[in-house]
DNA sequence: TCTTATCGGTTTGTCCGACAAAGCTAGATT
DNA sequence: AATCTAGCTTTGTCGGACAAACCGATAAGA
């Protein structure tokens, strides 16, 4: 082999991938801003000089990656990847990797505590208003496990948002999505479960309002321990998420 | 509106999406296991009764989602989504959302501390061997910022792996990927930076070996604070990751 | 005048057929 | 038996085609 190679590596990616990469590059480095149109398929065909089928395959890749979407009239435009769309993929990956609820619980304990700490420090009046609104609706829904589970999910999303830390928001989302269906099972199966949940949220919101970090952390811990106790009444922490959901069918809507 | 609607919602997803959904369903619920072949495009054409172009668009969606891949001979097979492929997408999303290094730092502090706690509790002999190996190589690379940054990244991945918590492993990855390029900048710019980094890793590994959680947590904090001090010498914590990388070009290889 | 209906022109989603390149298979050759 | 070769398969790409949905603007009606 010569010291200085005569040739550089050839770039031999399939054309559809190059199309996707080219568009991605423009979005990532900001030359195309979120919301701006990408152009029609025909225009892309002309610009890249490839067939429309090829362009379309490239578009599918970007669309799935969340970098572009089609607006109401199906025209292509750049967009900010939505956290919970990406998180859905991750949640799926976690299921396929057969993670256990114990892993989920441990990680969530860390993430939710961090989230509440941030919220206590930095929640805005608007954040607090959103949380209050959620709490009011939750109080109404105590008797309805499905609704309450959804409101619980929303409460924790709002708390992460109140932390003003988007990295944290994103990091907690996959685990939270896997938690969600179990909350319904637990609230439905454990008497007083709903009331305890709302009670915990009330104290959490209160701690955020009073900027009382210690109380916030304590109630988060209690809230999650509650979940854990409830969960252990109906399933094992050490079984995989996948198997548990399989057995409690019907919890897998989308 | 009648009490019981006469008609059910129409299912009006495009065909390529239905193809992707159908295959995804089979993989998620385990009827197709990771590694198993999906079949050729022609077979899918026959099974779904749609055109090959349509099948191919569906395949692109799944491929980008990490649920299927093409093996050495380009045949389709189901696969376990790789964490760091998914994390790459999340990192990209974080960049587009213009997160700041402050957010990154705060979230990483939480995640790395949790990771080391898990490692102290549950690291296996093999985990420790991997970490030792990494440490030895790092000691060799003290003078080489690029290599050392890569080894640092690997060290933290190995520590997360040693925590035996896959949810945590996945949750920390996106933030870690954004950290990585800065480590090189810091080690290159701060004298003694490399030595301090290796020193911190040595103490971390030691704490894991001795199952000394307190020391592990303390050294993780110190390690990250070191990063932060180094970082603040060359850039501002409150600027977005995107802008910082733009200015320090060349750190964006892939 | 304001609303509604209509009618081309675009654009997307899908289909058909085709072909070169690369991989695989199995029979032919040494 | 190991190797080579020719044929078959599969993927990546291309060109063209068409129905349905959508857009914009104009014409008709209240």
Image (spheres, coloured by chain):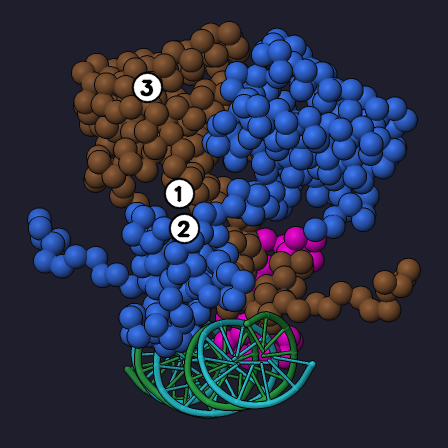
Chain colours: A blue, B brown, C green, D cyan
Q: Is residue A127 left or right of residue B128?
A: right
Q: How many other residues sit within 10 Å of disc 1, few (<14), some (14-19) or many (≥20)?
A: many
Residue located beneath label 1 in the image? B96
| Label disc, if present, on residue B227 of the rendered structure | 3
At a point 70% along the width and 31% down the height, the residue shown is A134
Secondary structure of residue under mark 2: loop
Q: Is residue A233 visible?
A: no
Which sits in the foreground, B44 or B205? B44
Which range is magenta?
B27-56
> Is disc 1 in contact with disc 3, using a CB cutoff of under 8 Å?
no
In the rendered view, would you say B57 is above or below B95?
below
Q: Is residue B142 left or right of residue B30?
A: left
Residue located beneath label 2 in the image? A34
Q: Chain of mark 1?
A: B
Q: Residue B41 in the image: x percent, y percent?
A: 53, 73
Disc 2 to disc 1, C-alpha distance: 9 Å
> Is disc 2 in contact with disc 1, using a CB cutoff of under 8 Å?
yes
Secondary structure of residue under mark 3: helix
């Amino acid at each position: 082999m010569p010291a200085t190679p005569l040739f550089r590596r050839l770039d031999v990616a399939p054309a559809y991938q190059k199309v996707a990469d080219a568009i991605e590059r423009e979005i990532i480095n900001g030359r195309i801003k979120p919301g701006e149109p990408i152009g029609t398929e025909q225009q892309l065909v002309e610009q890249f000089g490839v067939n429309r089928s090829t362009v379309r395959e490239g578009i599918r890749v970007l669309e799935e990656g969340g970098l572009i979407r089609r607006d109401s009239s199906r025209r292509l435009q750049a967009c900010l990847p939505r956290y919970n769309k990406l998180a859905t993929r991750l949640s799926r990956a976690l299921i396929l990797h057969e993670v256990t609820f114990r892993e989920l619980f441990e990680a969530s304990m860390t993430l939710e505590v961090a989230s509440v700490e941030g919220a206590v420090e930095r929640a805005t009046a608007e954040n607090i208003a959103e949380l209050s609104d959620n709490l009011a609706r939750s109080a109404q829904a105590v008797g309805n496990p499905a609704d309450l589970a959804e409101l619980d999910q929303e409460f924790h999303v709002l708390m992460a948002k109140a932390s003003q830390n988007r990295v944290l928001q994103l990091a907690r989302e996959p685990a939270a999505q896997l938690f969600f269906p179990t909350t319904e099972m637990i609230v439905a199966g454990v008497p007083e479960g709903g009331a305890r949940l709302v009670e915990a949220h009330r104290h959490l919101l209160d701690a955020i309002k009073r900027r009382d970090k210690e109380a916030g952390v304590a109630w988060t811990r209690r809230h999650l321990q509650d979940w854990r106790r409830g969960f252990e009444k109906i399933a094992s922490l050490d079984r995989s998420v996948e198997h548990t959901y399989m057995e409690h069918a019907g919890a897998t809507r989308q």
